[in-house]
Image (cartoon, rainbow, N blue to C red):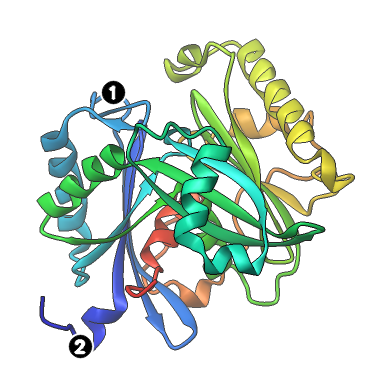
């Protein structure tokens, strides 16, 4: 492929494909700054396109994404796509510099150590999360089956785009938050990605990433999806989320009860009922908007944009990736 120059080489599309929604965001790098240029989103929960994170209708998925792309008319020819957290083996592990230098050997050893099925071909990646232990710096290890990546690659190529990255949801959301929030923001936030039946926790401590964990809800979430559910369902879900957050972040003292705020991501992020119910369990406020830097938004922000900003944040993290990363 010929080397692209100018603006096209700086732009990337971030594409989020989940059970409940699809999102397309175009981003651009300019020096050390990131800008969000265009965005579009559509709910697809009743279309039978994606189930438990897996694409069950490739043609329908491509068609819906093409409709969103036609809306925003991006210039980007490169794209990054998300991998739902429930399809990724995520573990935090300490690594020393010698092991990192011998990454190919470490990869095979790490697969066996953490009981990743060696008979299933998988891709392994890692991300430093800014924490030190006596055994070395902590890294987030992500293992994804190759057939899952190939499944999404086919969709991206079906749109005439070139895939440059496939990131787990927590990593994409973290990158989106860090790139989009105010540069002087040193607050601590708890993020909850509620993409039922799964929900995923991660946190930012002064701009550093900590992965909490992913769980499957025991609540009858179909009752919530059908609309007008009884309050008892929201109470059960909020209680379960609160307890899980306390368990995942037990090593971090009073967090998340001393967090600056809690930010919801995913299909249920705009739900006022869920926000109010979670507020009965958590001390920090459930934020309606993310403290993003509006100067980095190059497209017109609609009146409802702030309330669904959490739904776009994974797409932003994907759209702001460098082609060379």
Q: Residue at x 18, y 83 (%)?
A: 4
Which sits in the foreground, 234 or 186? 186
Which sits in the foreground, 101 or 122? 101
Q: Residue at x 45, y 17 (%)?
A: 227
The residue carrying mark 2 is 5
Which sits in the foreground, 143 or 297? 143
Q: Secondary structure at mark 1?
A: loop
Q: Residue at x 52, y 28 (%)?
A: 198
Residue 31, given in percent of the width and then of the height, sits at 44, 88
How crowded pointer 2 is (Cα within 10 Å; few <14, some 14-19, many 20+) is rated as: few
Which corner quadrant of the image does residue 50 belong to?
Answer: top left
| Left or right of residue 164: residue 58 | left
Which corner quadrant of the image does residue 273 belong to?
Answer: top right
Residue 210, given in percent of the width and then of the height, sits at 67, 52
As displayed, is residue 90 above or below residue 207?
above
Residue 256, given in percent of the width and then of the height, sits at 79, 44
Q: Secondary structure at mark 2?
A: loop
The residue carrying mark 1 is 46
């Amino acid at each position: 492929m010929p080397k692209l120059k100018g603006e096209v080489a700086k732009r990337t599309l971030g594409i989020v494909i989940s059970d409940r929604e699809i999102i397309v965001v175009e981003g651009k790098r300019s020096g050390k700054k990131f800008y969000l240029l265009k965005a579009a989103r559509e709910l697809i929960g009743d279309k039978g396109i994606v189930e438990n994170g897996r694409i069950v209708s490739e043609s329908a998925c491509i068609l819906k994404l093409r409709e969103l792309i036609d809306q925003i008319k991006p210039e980007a020819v490169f794209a990054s796509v998300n991998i739902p957290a429930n399809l990724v083996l995520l573990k935090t592990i300490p690594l020393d510099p010698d092991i990192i230098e011998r990454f190919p050997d470490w990869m095979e050893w790490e697969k066996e150590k953490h009981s990743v099925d060696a008979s299933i071909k998988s891709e392994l990646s890692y991300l430093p999360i800014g924490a030190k232990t006596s055994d070395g710096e902590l890294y987030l290890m992500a293992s994804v089956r190759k057939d899952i990546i190939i499944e999404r690659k086919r969709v991206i190529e079906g749109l005439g785009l070139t895939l440059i990255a496939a990131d787990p949801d927590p990593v994409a959301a973290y990158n989106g938050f860090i790139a989009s929030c105010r540069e002087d923001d040193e607050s601590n936030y708890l993020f909850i990605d509620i993409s039922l039946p799964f929900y995923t926790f991660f946190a930012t401590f002064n701009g550093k990433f900590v992965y909490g964990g992913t769980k499957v809800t025991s609540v009858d979430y179909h009752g919530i999806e059908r609309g007008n559910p009884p309050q008892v369902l929201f109470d059960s879900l909020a209680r379960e989320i609160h307890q899980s957050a306390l368990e995942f972040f037990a090593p971090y003292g009073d967090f998340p009860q001393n967090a600056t705020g809690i930010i919801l991501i995913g299909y249920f992020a705009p739900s006022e009922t869920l926000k109010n119910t979670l507020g009965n369990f958590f001390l920090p406020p459930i934020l309606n908007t993310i403290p993003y830097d509006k100067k980095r938004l190059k497209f017109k922000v609609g009146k409802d944009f702030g309330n669904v900003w959490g739904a776009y944040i994974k797409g932003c993290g994907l759209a702001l990736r460098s082609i060379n990363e």
